[in-house]
Amino acid sequence: MQEYGKVEVMEDKGAVGTTMRRTYTASIVSVMAAGHKDSFVTAAADFIHVELGGIPGDRHYGIMVPADVRQNWYPKGTMIANRRQISIVSAEECEEIAVRMGLPEVRAEWLGANILVSGLEGLTSLPRGSRLLFPDGTGLICEGENEPCTGPGAVIGEQYGRPELSGMFVKAAYKRRGIVCSVEREGTINRGDSCEILIPR
Amino acid sequence: MQEYGKVEVMEDKGAVGTTMRRTYTASIVSVMAAGHKDSFVTAAADFIHVELGGIPGDRHYGIMVPADVRQNWYPKGTMIANRRQISIVSAEECEEIAVRMGLPEVRAEWLGANILVSGLEGLTSLPRGSRLLFPDGTGLICEGENEPCTGPGAVIGEQYGRPELSGMFVKAAYKRRGIVCSVEREGTINRGDSCEILIPR
């Protein structure tokens, strides 16, 4: 049974204040990886193994990566810590994007997502520093909202054979495009897993 | 001249929205490292070199570290990504702590700080994901507030030969104890450097 929206305060057993509240449980609908250098589109898998640099073999894997336009406070190409390792979207928000674009569906793979969750309202608004915890102990850190760029719009346009859809994505996906995460504890995330979400106080 | 409080919006030249606003400039009053295994107290240096795991040789250095009570969503000792590499405090907040404790001063070294800044109001409230940028291109990521624990109280009590001070620190330092950071771009931070601070939108 989904504990959706039920707030459980974690017991504090330590010398410091409790820094997190346990708030949500979500379901992992699918896991995906982008194995091709020439496309960010992902493909479904039974599980993904995550290491400190992300998903080995995935397009976004790396302990360090070159800075791009999203980190424009560094010169392009500067090697920096990779905080955009894993992209997570929600079924609910993908459905909202589809509705806003007048489409039957917008698939997580087309957005280059690595994890599709359901049962969590407002995934994109999850605060930075939230933790996503999986059954084997794997832990991800929410690094914030994934701001929509134009790439997925082009993919959606191709999928439907309607290039005019391309320009609609950024606006339709605003505040609905999910989050990016980095790995806090290495492990394996399986399709069908549950996921606990801790929110910073 | 200090640009204290002056907001400058960064120009967006990329495909994505501008994710940061350039907000503050602070001064680096001193830099410090904790070279001894038996104490978190730090000692002043002319510069600190920071790598992806923090300050080499410092007590808190490590790409991965064992989880402790601050990450009590993992079993104690679980190897996790180190997001508490560098401790930063401000002269203004240390002064406030001293006043609240009725003391002439509370030194950054006694708090185990690695960087003492001045000219920045409310350092402890800096949002997670803020970036601190230094003249040689070094960049740190704010990982959030450093919640006061009892250790520094004991050090302060020893310094003044007044053990009764020990229990006062946690309350006096609440929301004033500074932040913890991780390294985004490696480099060197010098005493006397300026520091630009970018705040996430």
Image: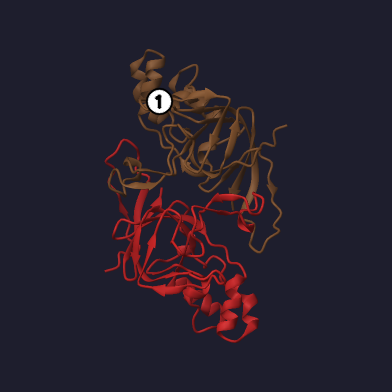
Chain colours: A brown, B red
Q: Identify the residue under disc 1.
A: A36
Q: Label 1 amino acid?
A: His
Percent from the top left, x then y, of residue A128? 50, 47
Residue at the limit of the structure toward the top, as seen here: A161
Q: Splitting the image into 4 quarters, where does residue B14 fall? A: top left
Mark 1 Cα shell of 10 Å, populated few (<14), some (14-19), many (≥20):
few
Q: Is residue A199 left or right of residue A33?
A: right
Q: Splitting the image into 4 quarters, where does residue A174 fall? A: top left
| Foreground residue among A180 and A190 | A190
The relative height of residue A117 versus residue B122 in the rendered view (above or below) is: above
Kind of element beneath mark 1: loop
Please give the name of the residue rendered at 34% of the width and 18% of the height, measured from the top-left corner: A164
Chain of the residue where label 1 is placed in the rendered structure:
A
Q: Is residue B154 visible?
A: yes
Q: Is residue B62 left or right of residue B136?
A: right
> Across the whole image, how many numbered discs are drawn on residues?
1
The relative height of residue B8 versus residue A127 in the rendered view (above or below) is: below
Percent from the top left, x then y, of residue B106? 50, 78
Q: Is residue B165 left or right of residue A172?
A: right
Q: Is residue B25 visible?
A: no
| Foreground residue among B65 and A156 | B65
Please give the name of the residue rendered at 54% of the width and 65% of the height, measured from the top-left corner: B175
Percent from the top left, x then y, of residue B70? 61, 57
Residue at the limit of the structure toward the bottom, as seen here: B161
